[in-house]
Amino acid sequence: MSAETAARRIGLIIVGDEILSGRRQDKHFSKVVEMLSARGMQLGWAEFLPDDRARLAEAYRRSFASGDVVFSCGGIGGTPDDHTRQAAAEALGLPLELHPQAAEAIAQRAAEMAAKGQGSADMSTPENQQRLQMGVFPRGCEIVPNPYNRIPGFFIRDHTFVPGFPVMAWPMLEWTLDTRYRALQHARAHVEHSFLVFGMPESRITPAMLTVESRWPGVRAFSLPSVGEAGGTPHIDLGVKGEPEAAAAALEYLRAEVLRLGGKLAPPAA
């Protein structure tokens, strides 16, 4: 595998006014991070966007141009407040058309529901014609199978578009990771190490963090301060992430610098 393939960034776009207004709480971000981590992959960036066609189209233009692998959750339904399919087509300058495999899957779903006494299997009815709108995708895309209710998502130019419902979206994203992007899984050895520092301001250790990133290219230093919430002792969660051997050396350097500069590795006695 080439270094370029292994280094590809992965982005996440979460669409929905209901997320931004607080009517629903997002669950996709943490789950996608978990999915990727289990496969030795990392999320590079994330965006939360409204159900606004112009804003979505602008965001997709940027993400298509980036060359990143992108997962987009939400807004692919057939109601007037769903704009993701149209925005993706606009961003690519492509027409929308009913995908034949999507039409077949939606017809199968209608037949299954009709067998349970819910609706009709006749795809010419107004209700089923409306359902078919959920299979209208940008020309040239491929479908993403939906094991929950057959209504597919779509894939085009390294972008995977799935519904906002976690019960549908998550297995669809896992299928995508394990079929389209298996070569990216566990492609790079990557570790993250940290330790707690007491009695030291961030400003004192910042020069050492800069030294880490110049001395060990590819290793990033991080600092997560705590002000002592809930009666705890103020401290810094100081660490590094990157290639295992280099990260280990950088970690030992940081630990030694903390001690040299007067920091402590344990909280003061009560």
Image (cartoon, rainbow, N blue to C red):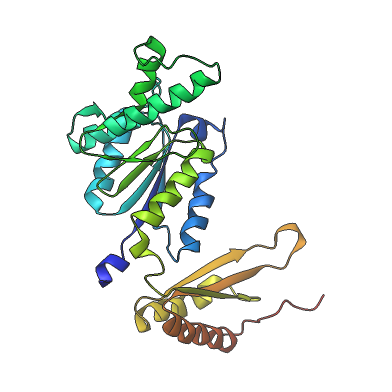
Q: Position of residue 265 (x, y in %)?
A: 66, 81
In the displayed structure, 199 sits above or below 119; it is below
Quarter holding the N terminus is bottom left
Which residue is at the far front?
A: 115
Q: Position of residue 183 (x, y in %)?
A: 33, 64
Q: Is residue 161 visible?
A: yes
- Give left or right: position of 229 versus 142: right
Q: Position of residue 168 (x, y in %)?
A: 49, 39
In the displayed structure, 119 sits above or below 2; it is above
Find residue 4 and report its image quarter. Answer: bottom left
Which residue is at the far right?
A: 270
Q: Nearer the viewer, residue 237 or 56?
A: 56
Q: Nearer the viewer, residue 133 or 222?
A: 133
Figure label count = 0
Report the residue at 34% width, 12% height from top: 124
Report the residue at 69% width, 63% height from top: 228
Q: Is residue 54 visible?
A: no
Q: Nearer the viewer, residue 142 or 230?
A: 142
Quarter holding the C terminus is bottom right
- Give left or right: position of 101 versus 199: left
Which residue is at the far left?
A: 93
Report the residue at 52% width, 77% height from top: 204
Q: Position of residue 147 (x, y in %)?
A: 47, 40
- Give left or right: position of 132 versus 42: left
